[in-house]
Image: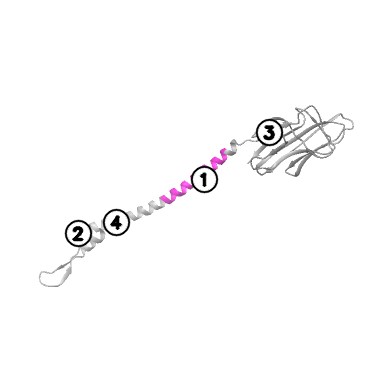
Amino acid sequence: MLWFLLLFCGLSLADEGGNALETQSCSPDICNLMKEVGAMSEKIKSLESRLQESEAGLKVSVIRLQNSETQISDLRSKVTTKVIFSAAIGGNGDVGPFNTDTTLIYRTVITNIGNAYNAATGVFAAPYAGVYYFTIFHHAGGRFGTELYLYKNSQRMVRTQNHKAVNETAHNGGNAVFLQLNQGDQVYVRLNARSYVWGSLYHTTFSGFLVHM
C-alpha cells in the first residue's frame, strides 16, 4: 500500500499547453496518510521484534520448567526409595569353627524392605547406587576366638574380633561402616577359619540401610 501511495504522489501530469511534464506534489491528506502508514509500519516491526523476543523467552521458560519437573521427580523418587534390612543367624547353637573362611547366612530375616538381602545366600545386593550403612554384631562362647569380616564384593572392609576367652565364659563384639556402592555391588559377612559365633534369633546379626542416593 505504501508503494502505491508513493506512486500516486509522484504522478506526472501533462501540462495543458504543451508536452512538458511536471510532478504534482502530494496533497496534504495523502501526505499525512503516508506518514501515518510509515509510523504504523515501524510500530509493526517493533511489535514483531518484541514478539520474537517473547517467544524466545517462553522457550527458555519451558525448558526451565521441564528441568524443574525432572528434578522434582528425581527428588520424589529418592524420598520414596527405601532399602532397609536386618537379619539374625537363627538356630540355637554354635556356628563353626570351620577349616576355611565361610560366608555366614543370616537365615532369620527381621526386616527386608526393598528385598535386597538374600536369606538363602547371606548376601546383600545394592539395588541402587548410593551410600549405605552396615552393622555386624556377634555373640560367642569363650572356647574359641571369633573373627568376622564384612566384605564389599571381594574386598575386606571392616572386622570384628575376639580372642579365645581366658576368664570370661562368652564374648560379644561388633563393627559398623558407611560404604559407597554401585548398583549390583554385594555386601556379606565371612567367618574366619577356626573361629565361631553363637547362632540364635537375637545375638549375631547383620543389618544395613540406604543413607543417600
- The disc placed on residue 85 is 3
Q: Amino acid at mark 3?
A: Phe
> From what the image shows, is residue 187 above or below residue 171?
below
**Residue 56: within the magenta?**
yes
Q: Amino acid at mark 1?
A: Asn
Look at the image and tell me in which quarter the N terminus lies: bottom left
Look at the image and tell me in which quarter the C terminus lies: top right
Q: Earlier in the sequence, mark 3 or mark 1?
A: 1
Of circles 2 and 3, the one toward us is 3
Question: What's drawn in magenta, residue-wise?
Answer: 55-76
Residue occupying image coordinates x 29% and y 56%: 39
- The disc placed on residue 67 is 1
Give the CA separation, mark 3 to mark 4.
76 Å
- The disc placed on residue 118 is none
Q: Residues within 10 Å of mark 3 (few under 14, many from 20)?
A: many
Secondary structure found at label 4: helix
Q: Earlier in the sequence, mark 2 or mark 3?
A: 2
Residue toward you, 172 or 112: 112
Secondary structure found at label 2: helix
Q: Is residue 159 left or right of residue 20?
A: right
Q: Quadrant of residue 183?
A: top right
Q: Position of residue 51 (x, y in %)?
A: 38, 51
Give the CA separation, mark 2 to mark 3.
92 Å
- Image marks 3 and 1: residues in contact by CB distance under 8 Å: no
- The disc placed on residue 39 is 4
- The disc placed on residue 28 is 2
Q: Earlier in the sequence, mark 2 or mark 1?
A: 2
- Image marks 3 and 4: residues in contact by CB distance under 8 Å: no
Most common SS among magenta residues = helix
